[in-house]
Amino acid sequence: MKLLSIEYIPDTKYEALGMVKGTIVQTKNIGRDFMAGIKTLVGGEIVGYTEMLNEARQIAVKRMVDEAKELGADAVIGIKYGSSQVMSGAAEVIAYGTAVKILKD
C-alpha cells in the first residue's frame, strides 16, 4: 500500500474512500521515567522516549493501514500525525489520512 504525505497522487486517477486513522495511547515505564528525570539534569536526547514514540507511530500507522485495507484502498494520501498528553505519563499518537482506490484506465 502506498502511504503518501502529499494531498494527491500525480498523474493518477483514484476514488476517495474516506478518512482512515490509527491511534494508540502509550505510557512510559518507571525505568524510562527515572532515566528521563536524570537526563533533564545533564541535557541531551531521551532515547527511551524517542523509542517509545517511534514504536507508537509504527503501531498507529499499522492500524490506519488496516482500516484502509478494510475499505479496499490501494493508498493513503495526505497522511498526518498528531500527539497529545491524555494523562500524566501517557501520550496518544494518531496517524490519519484519506484512503483511496486507484482507478485502472
Image: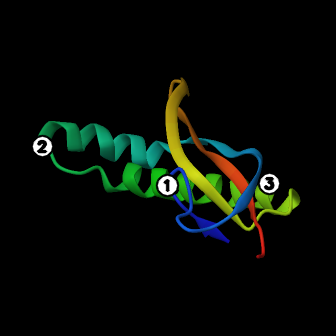
In the figure, is residue 92 to the left or right of 1? left
- CA–CA distance between discs 1 and 2? 36 Å
Q: Is residue 28 visible?
A: no
Instruction: Tell me the element at label 3.
Output: helix
Image coordinates of residue 33 in percent, x first then y, are 40, 41
Instruction: Identify the image quadrant of residue 100.
Output: bottom right
User: Which residue in the rendered view is the most extreme toward the front?
Assistant: 105
**Looking at the image, can residue 84 be seen?**
yes
The kind of residue tagged 1 is: Ser
Residue 97, above or below 14: above
Mark toward the viewer: 1 or 3: 1
Mark 3, Cα crowd under 10 Å, few <14 / some 14-19 / many 20+, is some
Residue under circle 3? 67
Task: Locate residue 48, reporting x and y percent.
Answer: 39, 54
Disc 1 target residue: 5
Q: In the image, which disc is placed on residue 42?
A: 2
Asked if residue 54 is positioned above or below residue 28 in the image, the reply reads: below
Seen from the viewer's position, the closer of residues 61 and 99 is 99
Of mark 1 and mark 3, the one earlier in the sequence is: 1
Q: Residue at x 50, y 36 (%)?
A: 83
Determine the residue positioned at 62% across, 67% down: 12
